[in-house]
Image: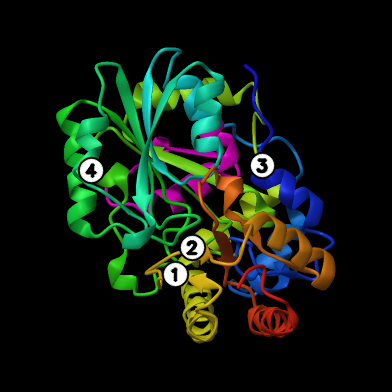
Amino acid sequence: MSLRPFALERYFARHEFSAKYLLGSSDPETVSVAQLLALEPGSEDGLSRLRLGYTESAGDSSLRREIAGLFETISPDQVLVFSGAEEPIFAFMNTALERGDHLIVHFPSYQSHYAVAESLGLQVSRWSGDPAGGWAPDPAELPRLLRPNTRAILVSSPHNPTGHHFGRGAWNDIIAVARRHGLLLFSDEVYRGTEHDPGDRLPAACDLYENGVSLNGLSKSCGLAGLRLGWIAARNPALLARLAEFKDYLTICNSAPSEYLGRIAVRHSSELFERTRRRLVGNLGLLETFFLRQERLFHWQRPRAGTTTFPEFRDGSALEFCDRLVEETGIMLVPGGLFDVEGEFLRFGYGRADFPEALAKLEEHLAQRAPARA
């Protein structure tokens, strides 16, 4: 295996903890330990009594019961808890797929969705969203991408970085294609719960399809990235067994304090979702006004879900703009090239509490900036 550097994560490593404003981050405003414990009286005492030994490799049994309750068809033994969402992506690629298999990836995408597969000798086809159509991929193209050696389809909805969210008809069509051809459907659902209208929330892939594999966690919709808890829910027992065996070579088990706090978070996930949703909707209104004033510099379409949006930058190199911006102002945006996208795009994240201040600082900078071209 020879993995190329993770461009997005290397960019964050350079700027995330030095920039004053993280205007391109995908995680929303975080929750403090005190705020989380306040959701359940007495939980602080429970945390202080927690023994710091090893935990169950599959995840704490009570945590898995809580997670299973988020689904319609899933039992606790059909849930595997991992360290964040990156670890289960890596485990899936190494256990469900083999060299020479073909994988279709909804694109643009988080780099590990396709780079890990490529490093393992898989063939990867990109099912690309159309920037002119709200980044929706063409449903008619998906069947045309199939090959005799296609093993899986990977999709993400709500989508990072674009904010696209499948409608129910498109979602059912994807599942029908996977079922018709006996394919695994790996569904990255880590932004599930960030729908701006909760009525737009889609059923989880693992609930609708016997070979659906749902990835989720606490980082995005709950604002708990620091707990480093993610999970896979699936009804395929052979796949779950392989994932569990592979995890023995990774983290083995999770942090006991994280799992304790994670149980509280999952039990109160609806409250945490709503906390995030209200901030997203409020900030999105400010962002819409900003883009109306800045039409010369950006072409933008309002997203329906998620914590990020991906406008086109119309005034030169997005990478050069972002590099200058963080150096001159301390505002970090994410250039679209880090997602292997052709053209000039920027990722805005609008889930943070300081978003109004950061956006105002950006607009102030733009007012002082000479255009790159007439």
Viewer-side label of 1, 3: 3
Name the residue at 36% across, 22% down: 102
Please tell me whether residue 183 is drawn above or below residue 74 in the rendered image: above
Which residue is at the far front? 374
Viewer-side label of 1, 2: 1
Q: Residues within 10 Å of mark 4 (few under 14, many from 20)?
A: many
Q: Residues within 10 Å of mark 2 (few under 14, many from 20)?
A: some
Left or right of 23 in this view: 274: left
Q: Secondary structure at mark 2?
A: helix
The amino acid at mark 3 is Ala
Name the residue at 67% across, 74% down: 371
How far apart are the alpha carbons under marks 4 and 1?
A: 27 Å
Q: Position of residue 113 (x, y in %)?
A: 49, 37
Work out whether mark 3 precedes mark 2 in sequence or the reverse, and give the earlier one: 3
Left or right of 169 in this view: 29: right
Residue indicated by mark 4:
174
Residue indicated by mark 3:
7
Viewer-side label of 4, 1: 4
Viewer-side label of 2, 4: 4
Q: Nearer the viewer, residue 109 or 316?
A: 316
Tag 4 and tag 1, C-beta contact below 8 Å: no
Q: Secondary structure at mark 3?
A: helix
Specify start and end residues of the magenta stretch as a single range: 61-90
Please tell me whether residue 39 is drawn above or below residue 306 in the rendered image: below
Label disc, if present, on residue 270 of the rendered structure: 1
Work out whether mark 3 precedes mark 4 in sequence or the reverse, and give the earlier one: 3
